[in-house]
Amino acid sequence: MTVRRVPADFRTIQAAVDAAQPGDTVRVAGGIYAESVTIGPGKDRLAIVGSGPDNAILRGAGSGVGFKISGSGSVTIEGFTVAGFETGIVIFTSDNTIRAVIVTGNARDGIHVSAGSRNVFFQVTAEGNGENGIQIDGASTYVIHGVFGNHFVGSAVGMTVGPAKVIDNTVT
């Protein structure tokens, strides 16, 4: 298991993810990263750890997805603000953990679990997105100690969940 550092070892988060092997950690220093990040096949158990949501910011230009988990499971994303995309985070797989993340200012959903099960969201804030703060279509997902809401005129609700366990959250 290797630690890959952005920007010390890799210029972009995606470059570090592309070089990573299963079980590696990508550590991201404070800064604004204008990119989309896709965690595709062959990256199981990858951890992408930012220096905190006030410091590590993944910023889009109004389209695309900030973090997309597709093809690998047991991925951890921690310590980021994700803003300015069409959708902040999209998940298609199982057993992922999203922790200490702020998702805001995205044109559609802040977070969308399109498929997969047993995903965990812990201390996530998803507010001020165009549609749902979080939408969960997958099964057996846990949403714990989060804040979810939208404040745009005509926007949808803070949280739309299918079969999920929702524990100690604030929904506005």
Image (cartoon, grey):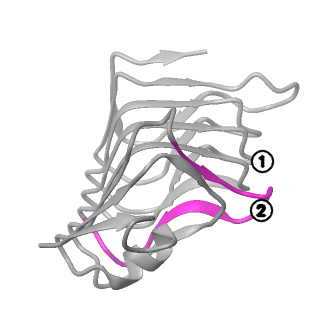
Q: Is residue 89 above or below residue 158?
A: below
Residue at figure coordinates x 34%, y 84% from the top left:
19
Q: Quadrant of the C terminus?
A: top right
| Number of other residues with Cα within 10 Å of mark 2, as a class: few under 14, some 14 to 19, many 20 or more | some
Residue 73 drawn at (x, y percent): 27, 68
Left or right placement of residue 112 versus residue 101 in this view: right
Q: Is residue 23 above or below residue 145?
A: below
Does label 1 or label 2 sit earlier along the sequence?
2
How far separated are the C-alphas under marks 1 and 2?
8 Å
Tags 1 and 2 touching, CB below 8 Å? yes
Q: Quadrant of residue 65?
A: bottom right
Q: Is residue 64 above or below residue 85?
A: below
Kindly identify which residue carries mark 2.
Answer: 63
Start and end of the magenta stretch?
Answer: 56-73
Please, which residue is most extreme toward the right here?
Answer: 153
The secondary structure type at the circle numbered 1 is loop
Q: Which mark is residue 107?
A: 1
Left or right placement of residue 121 versus residue 156 in this view: left
Q: Quadrant of the N terminus?
A: bottom left
Residue situated in front as seen by the camera: 157 or 98: 98
Residue 67 drawn at (x, y percent): 52, 60
The secondary structure type at the circle numbered 2 is loop
Residue 47 drawn at (x, y percent): 27, 60
Residue situated in front as seen by the camera: 156 or 65: 65
Q: How many marks?
A: 2
Q: Residue type at mark 2?
A: Ser
Q: Residue type at mark 1?
A: Ala
Residue at figure coordinates x 41%, y 18% from the top left:
169
